[in-house]
Image (tube, grey):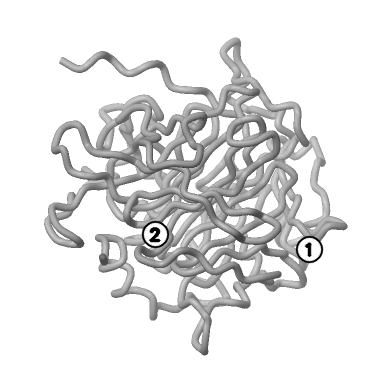
Amino acid sequence: MINSREARHCLTIAMTITPARNRLLMFASLSLLAACASSAAPQGFVSDPGTPDLVSPTDAGGATRVGLEAGSLGSLGDAHAPTVDAGPPRALLYAHTNTKLFQLDPLNVAAAPVLLGDFDCIGSGSGKATSMTDIAVEKNGKLYGVSAIAAYPLTVQAGVVHCDATWPLPQGSSFYGLTFAPENTVAAQEVLVAANGGGELFEIDSTTGNTTKVGAFGVDPATKLPWSLSGDIVFLANGGNPVGFATVRTCKSGSSGCSTVDTLIEIDVRAIKPGKQSVTKAVRGKVTTGAWCTNPQSPAEFDTIYGIAAYGDKVYGFTHTGGHILEMHNDDATACLVSSDAALSFAGAGVTTVAPVRAPPPPPPPK
C-alpha cells in the first residue's frame, strides 16, 4: 500500500541541493557565523560564546559529538526547568535533506544549518535508496539513519556521512521515522525504533539489524481512520519519565483523501513493546499557526513535517515543502514559522535522547 507520504515523496526525490549552500538564509547569529568561518571542519554551538564547550566533530568512536552542555538552557533556565538525564551532557540537533546532513543549534534553530556531508549510501545504483528519510541520535551521540527500505549506523568523517552497514527492513510499507527509545523503557538499554508509513513501529537490533514489531499509532478518535506516519517520531528520556511525539495524518484509502494538515500526537513510550497495540497517548492537535505567533509570514497550517525534534516545551518541525523550520507548543500543536529556505527540502531530523524536555500537561478530557 502506498501511503500519502510515499506519493508526495516520489515527486521530489530527484531534487538536488546546491553544495556551496549559497542560498542558505543568513540569520542573526554573528557569533555562530564567526565560529563556522574560523575552521574548515564543521563546528558545534554553545549557548554562550564565553562558555567554550565545543568538542571535535568526530570522537574516538566515530560518532559526531559536537553540542551544548545540557545545563545551558538559556531561556529555559527558570524554576520550571526540565529534568535532565544523567547521561553525557550533549544536546545534539540534526536535520537532513534526501542526501545531505546538517547540524543545528537547539537554542537558536534560526541560525544557518551547518553542512556535515553527504550520505554515501544514498543515490543511484543497484541496492541504493534514493533518500535518507530520517535519522536518530543515541545518548552518546552515535547517529543512525533510515531509508524507505533499510536502516544504517552512520559515522561522520572528513565531510562524508558514511553508512557503516545496511540493515534491510520489513517490506510492505516504506519507513520514514527513526528514534531511540530511552533506557529502561523498552529495555534496560536504549532501543532503536523505526516507523513506517502505515503507522507501524519496529524495534531494530542495533547489532544485527533484526526487527520486531512493537506497536502502532492506532486510529484517529475523531474520524475513526488509522493514523499513518506523515513525518517523524522522536523520544526523549526526560530523567526517567520518557516523552515522545510524532507527526501523523489520516487517509481515507491508501494515498487518497489524505488530511492536508499534519497532526501532532504524544506517544506513550512505555507502551512500546512486542505486539500490535496502540502507542498513542494523546492527540495534541493539528499543526496550525497559533495566536501567539508574531511572524506574519507563518502559514495558517503546516504539512509535510518530515522531521521533528523536541527541546524544552517545544517540538521543532522541518518541512519537505518550502524548507520551513517551525516551532510547536507541545501541549496543543500551535506553531510559528521560524525560518524558510526553499533550497532545503527537509526529509528528517533527530536529537539526542538526553536533550532537556518539558512534558506537556495531561490533555483535557473529551467533550
Image coords of residue 185 (percent x, y): 59, 31
Instruction: Tell me where residue 367 appears, x and y as whole percent.
Output: 15, 15
- Element type at mark 2: loop
| 1 vs 2, front mark | 2
Question: Which amino acid type is shown beneath numbered disc 2?
Answer: Gly
Instruction: Look at mark 1 in the image and give the residue it sits on.
Output: 39
Residue annotated with mark 2: 323
- Residue 190 vs residue 346, the one in the foreground: 190
Residue at position x 72%, y 49% in the image: 141
Q: Residue furthest right?
A: 60
Residue at 43 percent across and 22 percent down: it is 360
Q: Are marks 1 and 2 in contact (CB under 8 Å)?
A: no
Image position of 359 with respect to 275: above or below? above
Residue type beneath disc 1: Ser
Left or right? Give the position of 253 relative to 1: left
Viewer-side residue, 184 vs 153: 184
Residue at image coords 59%, 59%? 210
Earlier in the chain: of badge 1 and badge 2, it is 1
Nearer to us in this view, 61 or 114? 61
The local secondary structure at tag 1 comes to loop
